[in-house]
Image (cartoon, rainbow, N blue to C red):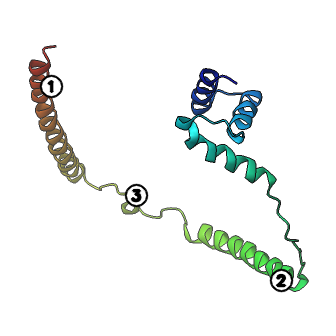
């Protein structure tokens, strides 16, 4: 096979674009004795593929079924299942509906509610202002970048 064709096939192989026939041609070339010196690094790769295809797993696998172990696993699964149901039922019983207005997080007087709302909005405003300050720095950075790169 010509060397230029082999080099093209290697390039396609590296890009993952070869089909089985082309890979077989590459394998036959690299398993032969006539490998170009600058392509000898690929020879070990294709030699490994050839060798790994010949390997066989010869150890016998035995599957022992242990009835005692499977019984304990079944018992443990049943206990977990019923324990989960029990926990779910108790959770539902404990989480009873809210009884009082204070449990809802509401206020008795409108003035108190207004003060708490003002506190919450002030906190929100403070955090938004912090974010706006960060955006000002980003705008300055953008202007500087545009001056440097002349956009």
Q: Residue at x 55, y 43 (%)?
A: 41
Residue 145 is situated, as x and y percent measured from the top left of the image, at 13, 24
Tell me the number on the disc at residue 71.
none
Sequence order check: which comes first, mark 3 or mark 1?
A: 3
Left or right of 67 in this view: 10: left
Left or right of 149 in this view: 67: right
Quadrant assignment, res 81 = bottom right
3 and 1 marks in contact (CB < 8 Å): no
Q: Quadrant of the C terminus?
A: top left
Residue depth check, mark 3 versus mark 1: number of the one nearer the observer = 1
Tell me the number on the disc at residue 142.
1
In space, the residues marked 2 and 1 are separated at their CA atoms by 67 Å
Quadrant assignment, res 129 = top left
In space, the residues marked 3 and 1 are separated at their CA atoms by 48 Å
**To which residue does mark 3 refer?**
104
Sequence order check: which comes first, mark 3 or mark 2?
A: 2
Q: Residue at x 55, y 67 (%)?
A: 95
User: Is residue 2 shown above or below 63?
Assistant: above
In space, the residues marked 3 and 2 are separated at their CA atoms by 51 Å
Residue depth check, mark 3 versus mark 2: number of the one nearer the observer = 2
* Label 3 secondary element: helix
* Label 2 secondary element: helix
Q: Residues within 10 Å of mark 3 (few under 14, many from 20)?
A: few
> Residue 66 or 102: which is nearer the viewer?
66
* Label 1 secondary element: helix
Q: Residue at x 60, y 21 (%)?
A: 4
**To which residue does mark 2 refer?**
69
Residue 53 is situated, as x and y percent measured from the top left of the image, at 78, 50
Instruction: Spot the residue most to the top.
Output: 151
Residue 75 is situated, as x and y percent measured from the top left of the image, at 81, 81
> Residue 42 or 56: which is nearer the viewer?
42
Sequence order check: which comes first, mark 2 or mark 1?
A: 2
């Amino acid at each position: 096979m010509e060397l230029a064709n082999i080099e093209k096939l290697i390039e396609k192989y590296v890009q993952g674009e070869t089909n089985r026939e082309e890979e077989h041609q590459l394998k036959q070339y690299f398993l032969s004795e006539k490998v170009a010196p600058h392509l000898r690094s690929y020879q070990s790769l294709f030699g490994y593929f050839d060798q790994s295809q010949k390997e066989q797993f010869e150890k016998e696998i035995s599957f022992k079924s242990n009835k005692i172990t499977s019984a304990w696993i079944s018992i443990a699964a049943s206990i977990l299942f019923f324990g989960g149901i029990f926990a779910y039922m108790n959770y539902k019983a404990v989480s009873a509906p809210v009884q009082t207005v204070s449990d809802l997080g509401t206020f008795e007087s409108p003035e108190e509610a207004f003060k708490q709302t003002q506190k919450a909005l002030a906190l929100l405003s403070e955090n938004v202002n912090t974010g706006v300050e960060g955006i000002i720095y980003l705008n300055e950075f953008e202007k500087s970048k545009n001056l440097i790169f002349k956009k």
